[in-house]
Structure formats: structure tokens, C-alpha cells
Image (cartoon, helix red, strand yellow):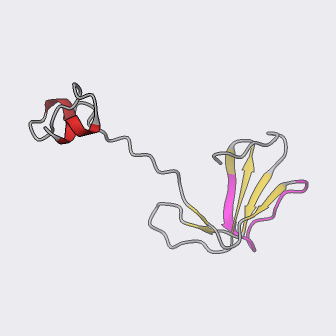
Amino acid sequence: MCGLSTDEKTPVALIGATLIDGTGRPALRDSTITFDGNRIKKVGTRDEIKVPEKATVIDLTGKTITPGFIDSHYHHFIYSTSPRFIDLSETKSLQEALNI
């Protein structure tokens, strides 16, 4: 729940969103996701999951929830070692770079 800060003792429920869980299963419409602290506790449809008493309820009807996407595949040194790229590290201006 990036960006959501709550008291860890207060349960949180996200309701109404379409959930794409990243497993290849069909999207789950009108979902409910409950959290215990910073952990997901239950996932299902709004009819299947009971929202805990005193929960902070966030209505996401019309929204979509997906897993966090992280691209950790990166070639850090490719630009300095490949002959396909021009070394512009010594240029002092855009015009100088364009003249190379």
C-alpha cells in the first residue's frame, strides 16, 4: 500500500476495485482487500470478505489495483562500453553535442 499511512492497529479495507493479481487469473471485480498492519489479510469479492469493525475503508470503485511493478533488469555500464553510443561526457552544451 504505497503511500498509505495508517495506525498499524487500525484495520484497513480497500473495497470496490477491480483486482489484477498478476497470476494470470481473471480480474476480480468489486474486490475487497483487508490488511492487518502492513500485511494483506484477506482478498475476495465484496460479498465474500467481511470488512473488520472500525476499519479504515477506502472505496476504490471504478479503479484498478495491480501488484507493484519493478524493473530490476538494467545494464548499468552498457552506455560506456558499447560502440553504438557516442561519449558526450566532455561536451559543454547541447549545440556542441549536436555537432559531434
Q: Residue at x 24, y 39 (%)?
A: 95
Q: Residue at x 52, y 51 (%)?
A: 68
In the rendering, at what x and y percent does residue 53 appear? 90, 56
Q: Number of labelled discs?
A: 0
Of all residues shown, which one is farthest toward the right? Answer: 54
Q: Nearer the viewer, residue 97 or 1?
A: 97
In the rendering, at what x and y percent does residue 87 appear? 17, 31
In the rendering, at what x and y percent does residue 63 appear? 64, 68
Of all residues shown, which one is farthest toward the front? Answer: 95
Main SS, magenta region, reads loop
53 vs 9: above or below: below
Q: What is the quadrant of the C terminus in the image?
A: top left
Q: Nearer the viewer, residue 73 or 97?
A: 97
The image quarter containing residue 77 is top left
The image quarter containing residue 9 is top right
Report the side of 96 relative to 6 (left or right).
Answer: left
The image quarter containing residue 27 is bottom right
Q: Residue at x 62, y 74 (%)?
A: 29
Q: Residue at x 30, y 39 (%)?
A: 74
Report the side of 55 relative to 42 (left or right).
Answer: right
What stretch of residues is rendered in magenta? 41-54
Report the side of 78 relative to 58 (left or right).
Answer: left
In the rendering, at what x and y percent does residue 43 appear? 66, 61
Q: Is residue 31 magenta?
A: no
Q: Nearer the viewer, residue 91 or 53?
A: 91
38 vs 47: above or below: above
